[in-house]
Image: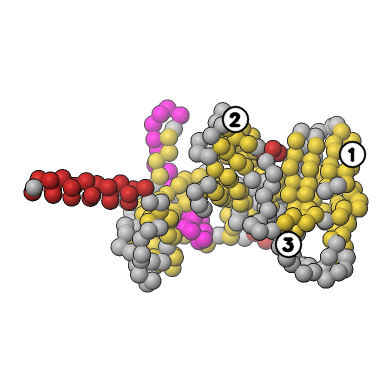
């Protein structure tokens, strides 16, 4: 009997462990309060102080990602969604070494000190305190810098051998020669929705000192999509909506084949488009904008959604509002005008643009 009880306890315990392993977790990011350079002649490092947002006694994780000349440092806890944590903040202090091993062409690795340090929403340049070459680590300093984001015009998708390539096209609004810094992360918002966060930006000591120019910035990243999901893309935490990507067990459904979803319990109310004109920008590569005019048929002031999809030389644009079927609106017409950058690059040829029920064909 004793052995039976022991076996039953073992089985119950094992089932509990397995159940816990299946419970998803979320990343609870810390709040960074201060970052200080550590005066250590042998190893460049920083001393980070902050608070953890929940009172669960879980390990503090530190992840480091080197992208170009920038080192991204994340300080967080992995918390099970089934865990109930005390509603208190917990202070923490950590030391983070900054040398990162980088693979060389001869299969060896080299320790590299990054040019920039990014800890959550804080940005620093790592510079010599006295501008001298070969400065010892102890004489380096952290200098706050300013983030300047790329202005994203479009996100397009390419399906290449079970890998989705996201291509971001846009401009960065300065002519400084500083490097473009990029990073992508993804987060599952529920069992079938995945949010992809793309960051494309520069870090500048003095943005006002840069020449005023719109510099094209193409950025391409490959993301494995072996798990069926619906992917939404957010660039630089902006509010611009890009077409969603859907992957299923039988393969990838590109945005051109997938209807753009509206919100829950809403209907899509399109604008009436009366005229479309196109304008070619003086840029290299060639860029084209369309200017549309029309109206919305009621007086409800709701956010206007502009969704754009491109199939070869055909560009489809939907302009609409998500509205509840029960919403009561003033019976009035409101004019609407917008200038919309067209996705992708353009060469000589004939192109067609469809904006709701109005179309335009033009030659370049």
The label shown at residue 133 is none
The one nearer the camera, 307 or 8, is: 8
Q: Do the residues labelled 1 and 3 touch (CB within 8 Å)?
A: no
Q: Name the residue under label 2.
A: 160
Q: Neighbour class for label 3 at 10 Å: few (<14), some, many (≥20)?
A: few
**Start-end of magenta stretch:** 105-126
Q: Name the residue under label 1.
A: 361
- Pinpoint residue 226: horizontal percent, then vertical percent: 50, 36
Residue drawn where x is 53% and y is 34% of the image: 249
Who comes first in sequence, dot 1 or dot 3?
Answer: 3
Q: Does the magenta stretch include residue 21?
A: no
Q: Which numbered mark, 2 or 3, is in the foreground of this view?
A: 3
Which element type, helix, strand or loop, lies under badge 1? strand
Q: Name the residue under label 3.
A: 325
Q: Neighbour class for label 1 at 10 Å: few (<14), some, many (≥20)?
A: few
Q: Neighbour class for label 2 at 10 Å: few (<14), some, many (≥20)?
A: few
Who comes first in sequence, dot 2 or dot 1?
Answer: 2
């Amino acid at each position: 009997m004793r052995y039976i009880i022991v076996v039953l306890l073992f089985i119950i315990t094992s089932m509990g462990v397995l159940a816990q392993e299946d419970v998803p977790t979320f990343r609870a990011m810390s709040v960074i309060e201060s970052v200080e350079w550590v005066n250590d002649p042998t190893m460049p490092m920083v001393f980070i102080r902050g608070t953890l947002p929940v009172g669960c006694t879980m390990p503090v994780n530190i992840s480091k990602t080197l992208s170009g000349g920038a080192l991204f440092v994340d300080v967080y806890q992995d918390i099970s969604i089934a865990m109930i944590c005390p509603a208190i903040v917990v202070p923490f202090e950590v030391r983070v070494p900054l040398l990162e091993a980088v693979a060389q062409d001869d299969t060896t690795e080299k320790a590299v000190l990054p040019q920039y340090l990014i800890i959550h929403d804080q940005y620093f340049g790592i510079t010599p305190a006295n501008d001298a070459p070969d400065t010892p680590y102890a004489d380096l300093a952290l200098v706050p810098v300013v983030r300047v984001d790329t202005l994203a015009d479009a996100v397009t998708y390419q399906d290449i051998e079970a890998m989705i390539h996201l291509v971001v096209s846009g401009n960065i609004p300065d002519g400084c020669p500083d490097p473009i810094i990029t990073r992508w992360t993804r987060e599952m918002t529920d069992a079938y929705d995945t949010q992809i966060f793309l960051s494309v930006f520069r870090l500048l000591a003095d943005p006002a000192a840069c020449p005023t120019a719109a510099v094209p910035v193409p950025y391409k990243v490959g993301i494995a999509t072996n798990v069926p999901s619906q992917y939404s893309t957010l660039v630089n935490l902006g509010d611009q909506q890009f077409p969603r990507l859907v992957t299923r067990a039988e393969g990838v459904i590109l945005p051109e084949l997938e209807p753009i979803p509206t919100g829950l319990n809403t209907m899509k109310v399109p604008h009436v488009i009366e005229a479309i004109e196109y304008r070619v920008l003086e840029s290299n590569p060639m860029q084209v904008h369309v200017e549309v005019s029309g109206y919305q048929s009621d007086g409800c002031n709701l956010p206007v959604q502009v969704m754009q999809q491109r199939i070869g030389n055909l560009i489809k644009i939907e302009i609409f509002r998500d509205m509840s079927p029960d919403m009561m609106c003033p019976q009035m017409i409101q004019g609407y005008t917008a200038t919309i950058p067209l996705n992708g690059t353009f060469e000589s040829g004939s192109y067609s643009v469809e904006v709701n029920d109005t179309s335009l064909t033009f030659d370049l």
